[in-house]
Amino acid sequence: MHPHRLLVCVGLCASAAAVAVAGDKPELRRLDNAFEVTPQRVARVRFEHSAARVVSAWADYSGGALRAADVRVFDCFGDNDSDGFMDDTGGCFTASNTRYFFGTSYCNMFVSADHTVWEKTDLDAGFARIDFAWQWTCRGFGTEPCLVAVFTQDSVPCDPDSFDYSGWVFDFGTLSCNPGGYYYTNATLSTGTWPIPTGGTGSHILYFASGQTSSGGLALATCAQPMLWGTEYGGDNQRGTQVTEQYDDDVLADGVHTISECHTYSFGFCPGPLGAMVQLWGEASSDPCDYANYNGDSTVNTQDFLDFLNSWNAGEARANCNGDSTVNTQDFLCFLNIWNACR
């Protein structure tokens, strides 16, 4: 999160007595047995005027194959070997697919979590694939149609939000409720992308629905929630970072986020902080000046140096300029050389 955004969030959270913390939610539980599901259909979707709406015709899903250039650029999934499956425990669990959730009585159908992408990401290429996991409680027994809309945006949870953004919605058909584990998917777009937020820092949104209205709106599912993991899970191939705040639609399930639904996800154990279990795929940048343009405003200038310096002082993973997994003086010199060459 950029420093000014962090200050805004802290200010907002401090000014609202109803801001939730870890203890305001049900007790965290562990769940394993990950069941892979593949979308049946896909369509474009917009979130505007406090509602998610399908804005294109549905097309049969034909994804599944990554483009040659695609790489993981944000991993809150635990996919250390880039195969789209949970293979890393990070010392947290003995089973690689064990993940956290808040129990079957908790419902959270509209989620906004932040991300800062891998420092070598091509910010203009867009996200071509998203991997995510969720607990499909629905009515508790039986089945329910499952649609999941995915959006990206520039702002981060607890910041002012336009609530006006576009994305894609996947139709998974009818899924069993409480299947004895959780569902996950590797959803690749055959055409189009999600925009990467300006500067590589923003948020991704999951919207769990059970159907589409006659006017194209998405009707919230009866009960669902994202599975939870963290970016700092201890793998040797970590991509991207996140902070502690997440927006959850759990005070009043109305498809709108309010400041009272800004939650802190720092629970003090591995991995931390937690966030919605999402992995984003994009392209690696081949131009070193993309990295020198640290704030993503298309101009390499003093502000990029200052933004990098703040990131480097904080020891953020994005400041690992030379890619050796350690943020130190060599990274400062690495960035200084690139920055000087690109001004």
Image (cartoon, rainbow, N blue to C red):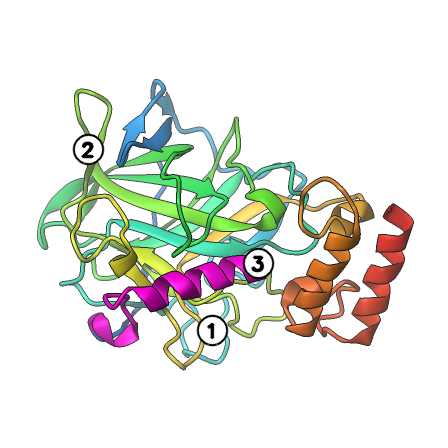
- The residue closer to the viewer here, 321 or 299, is 299
Disc tally is: 3
Label 3 or label 2, whichever lies nearer to me, is: 3
Q: Earlier in the sequence, mark 1 or mark 2?
A: 1
Indicate the secondary structure of the residue bearing disc 1.
Answer: loop
Q: Which residue is mark 3?
A: 2
Secondary structure, mark 2, is strand
Q: Residues within 10 Å of mark 3 (few under 14, many from 20)?
A: some
Residue 89, numbered label? 1
Q: Which mark is residue 327?
A: none
Name above or below for residue 218 compared with residue 32: above
Disc 2 residue type (three-letter): Gly
Q: Residue at x 66, y 66 (%)?
A: 311
The residue carrying pointer 2 sits among few (fewer than 14), some (14 to 19) or many (20 or more) residues within 10 Å by Cα, namely some
> What secondary structure is the magenta-colored segment mainly?
helix
Q: Is residue 15 visible?
A: yes
> Which residue matches tag 2?
211
Give how far apart the Cα atoms at labels 1 and 2 are: 35 Å
Pick whichever, 80 or 213, lies toward us.
Answer: 213
Asked if the residue at tag 2 contacts the one at tag 3, i.e. Cβ–Cβ closer than 8 Å, the answer is no
Q: Nearer the viewer, mark 1 or mark 2?
A: 2
Residue 116: percent from left, percent from top: 56, 56
Q: Which residues are magenta?
A: 1-26
Mark 1, residues whose alpha carbon is within 10 Å: few (<14), some, or many (≥20)? many
215 relative to 162 in the view: left or right: left
Image quadrant of residue 195? Answer: top right
Query: Is residue 23 magenta-colored?
Result: yes
Inspect this view and state whether residue 76 appears. Answer: no
| Distance from the alpha carbon under mark 3 to that under mark 2 | 37 Å
Q: Secondary structure at mark 3?
A: loop
Indicate the position of residue 253 as horizontal and vertical percent values. Answer: 17, 49
